[in-house]
Every structure is written in structure tokens, then in C-alpha cells.
Image (spheres, grey):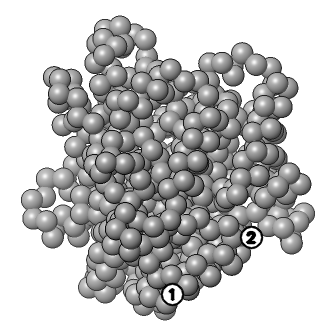
Amino acid sequence: MEEFYVDIHCHPTMRAFNTTPLAKNRNLWDKTQTDFVPTRVGKWAWKASKDVSKHSQSNFYNCVEGKTRIVFDSLYPIEKGFINFKKSHEFIVGKKAMDTLGVTASGISVERFKEYKASSDYFSELLSQYNFLVSNLGESPCGKYKSRIAKNYTDLIEALNADSNSVNIVLSIEGAHAFGCGTRDTELLSVEELKAKLKKNIEAVKKWEYPPFFITFAHHFWNQLCGHATTLKNAAKIACDQSKGLDLGFTELGEFVLEELLSTKNGKRILIDTRHMSVNARIHYFNYVKKHNQNNPNDLIPLISSHSAVNGFNTLSESVVLKDNSKKKKHTTYCAWSLNISAEEVVAIHESGGIAGVILDKGRHCGINILKNIDKITDLETKKEAFVKMICDNIFFYISSVNKKTAWDVLTIGSDFDGVITHFDCYDEMSKLPELKKDIVNYLTKTNYKKELWFNYSPTELMDKLFTQNAMDFLKRNFK
């Protein structure tokens, strides 16, 4: 079998579904573009978001070019917190100007933005994305390639062996709000009414022909299930308010939904991705998994953090001593927000047989000053090497946290392409994964960077594990 790569978190369907196609018809293959609103505010927003891709990063032609034959496609009904802005700022700046900011920053087309403004039903939006994906499976517009969704590991291996030109999708969801909670309307329902509603929707999703493998339980805004971590930078905070539910633990409703998702009595288990959960929620869930795994050694639940970076702290509790703001991460080596992973969390993922995806968002990898200094570099090769070192700094924090050879079984790629990230300048889309792998191998070979933590692997072997083998082993264990 030819060399191929795996990405456990990106958004090809969300991007194609919500953004203006460059080709005549919306599909998962061709590039899309972010709408440019030709107003003064539109021009400012376009320039201010220069580090966010205005074209699709994980369309399937990019996947083919980047040898990414297995793509975890994360469906995401866009949260109303990105659309229903703070009333005070909408009043001062003007509704039209705020909508322009929303379109430019999110990448949603003007047409789709208006639809979301009028909607209050996340579950119907989830169904629309799922149906769009399923209806677009099959041959590429050029007729050379195919896309399909895998139902389990065996199905996936058969497809890989049968067709070297296929893009194989493993389905996931970002945000449990997708089941129909976390809106102004659902805040009016009782806990029991919401339990009945969410139970019904979860059972419906588990009956899909292609049920999701895992779900990122929290996201940017309050979902009535558990607290979320700070994610928005100062500029985004001007328009969007994520303070409600910030840093809280699990609610009664959240514990109920957790049980429904992990149950095998109502259909296929849907695993939980802890990325975006608050520290309090993560601690609660880690304890839940540890107890379950001790009591059920033949039915282990792995911890997943699908698109992550590290924060440099030893423990979860240390990561929340200081409030998450720009000052906290200004002078740090790593991005020190509690959203990111501490050494304690790395150990928990490792002990559970879990997996962590390395996000390709430069803003999540390091402190503000480091990034500013790198952005000033004009020589492209020097800048590229600085970015590679930044990625290696994060990778080796994971390894040093466990400090044994099996630490290298934990990591894979979770790019978050098309998730409105501040991508690395030189690795801005899926087609660049082979180049990224080659550059990390060359950097390790040239510098012997932290060679004491290689545990007798060669640089090529390490990157084979990171870009392919670890994800495949994880799928073999868990994608039943």
C-alpha cells in the first residue's frame, strides 16, 4: 500500500456546505471562497483576518494531493454566539456592519449567514450537513477519484486496499449542541423536557447509516451540558460573548447526554472528544472514564483530544490559577490557556489508550511574543524552520510528560483545517502535509532535537507514527 496520511479533525463538509463555491455546484472536491463584502468594514475585516484562509483547506482534491486518504470529517452546526452578536456592539457599530464582520470572520456565505440568523434549530442544521455529505459521495468532478464513508475499521481497510484513489471519511461531530440544546428556546424547557428531546435526537443519529465515531462534546459557547474553555481572542470578544457557562463543570443534563452517547444499548457507542471542555468538565470526565475502565476492563473507553496543543503546565489545576487572557500567554513558550493540554492530561490520555491530534493552528502553539517574532522573519526558509521548531516543542512536551517509549503511540494529526484557524503560513492546507512531514524529519535529523526522547526510533519512524500509524492503531482498537 502506498504511503498515506490520516487527519482526525477537519471540516470539509462544513466548509463546502456553508461557503460560496468557486465551481458551479457545491461539492466536497472543489475549492470554495469566503465572500468579500466591499464595504469599509468588510475591507477592514478581510485584512484583520489575513491569517485565516479565505479558501477551503480540506477539500478532497487537497486531500488527494496531500496523500490524506483518511479524513475525520467533523460536522458542525455553527453556534448562534457567532451570529447573534452582543447587542451593545450591534447598536454602536450597526447591525449591517456586525453581519459583515461575521461573514468575513466565519467564512459563511452571505446567503447562509442570513439563514442561520433566522434559524434556532441546531439539530435540523446537523441533519442538513449530514445529508449534504452523503448525497455528495462518489466520483470527483474529474472522474479520477472517489469519496466514501467508512462504517468501521474492517470496512476502512478493505476500501484502502481496493482503491488507491479513494478519500475515506470517518464521521465526527463538533459540539453536542448539535443534538438540539444551547439556544434561547431550549433554555425555556425543563431538564426533563430536554432529556426527552436529546435522547430522541441521539437515538436518531445512532440509527444513521454512518453514525459518528466521536463527538467534541463542548465548543465555543454554552450548550447547557458542560462548561467550555476560553477560545476567543480580544478582537473576537468585541462581537461575541462566550462568558455564559465558561469554566463550569457538567450539568445534570450533560451527565445524562454523556451516558446516552457512550451507551451501547441504544445503538453504536459515540466516543467523547474533550477538546474545548473546561478544566472542571475535563476533570469530571477523566474521573468518569477512569472508574468505567477499572470496572470494565473488556470495554475500555479511550480519552480523545482531537485537535490540540499543550499549555506548558504540569497539572490541570495549575492551568486555571490565572485567568485565560492575552497577558497569560504573552511571554510563554506555549499557548498557556487552559483550553490546551497539561502534562497531567497527556498522562491520562496515554493511560486510557487514547489519542491526541496535533492542531495546525499557529495561534494555539505558542506565546504571543514568540509568534510576533516569527511573523517578522522575512526569509521563508528561516520562518519555516521556526514554525517546525514550534510544532516540535509541542510534540516533545507530550513525550516528556509520559517519558516512556509508548508516549509515541498517543499523537497524530488533527489539523482543524477549515475550522477558521490561524494556519501556519507554509502549511496552510491539506496538500501540504507531505511537506510538513518531510520538514519535521529533516529538522530532527539535522538538529538531533531532544534525541533522548526519541526512544531509539528514527525521525522517519516517529513521523510515520504521527502522520499515519497511531491513528490506524487507534481505529483498529476502537472503530468497531
- Find disc 2 in the rendering and name its residue: 480
Q: CA distance from mark 1 to mark 2?
A: 31 Å
Query: How many marks are shown on the rendered structure?
Result: 2
Q: Could you tell me which residue is drawn at 43 percent across and 20 percent down? A: 85
Residue sitting at x 29%, y 51%: 23
Using the image, tell me which numbered label, if any, was put on residue 455.
Answer: 1
Left or right: where does residue 342 sit relative to residue 302? left
**Residue 84 or residue 295, whichever sits in front:** 84
Question: Which one is in front, 379 or 323?
Answer: 379
Mark 2 crowd level (few <14, some 14–19, many ≥20, 10 Å Cα) = few
Task: Give amino acid for label 2.
Answer: Lys
Tell me the residue at 18%/53% (across/down): 375
Tell me if 164 is positioned left or right of 269 in this view. Answer: left
Dividing the picture into quadrants, the one containing residue 381 is: bottom left
Where does residue 249 sit, x and y in percent of width and height? 69, 36
Q: Quick one: SS at disc 1?
A: loop
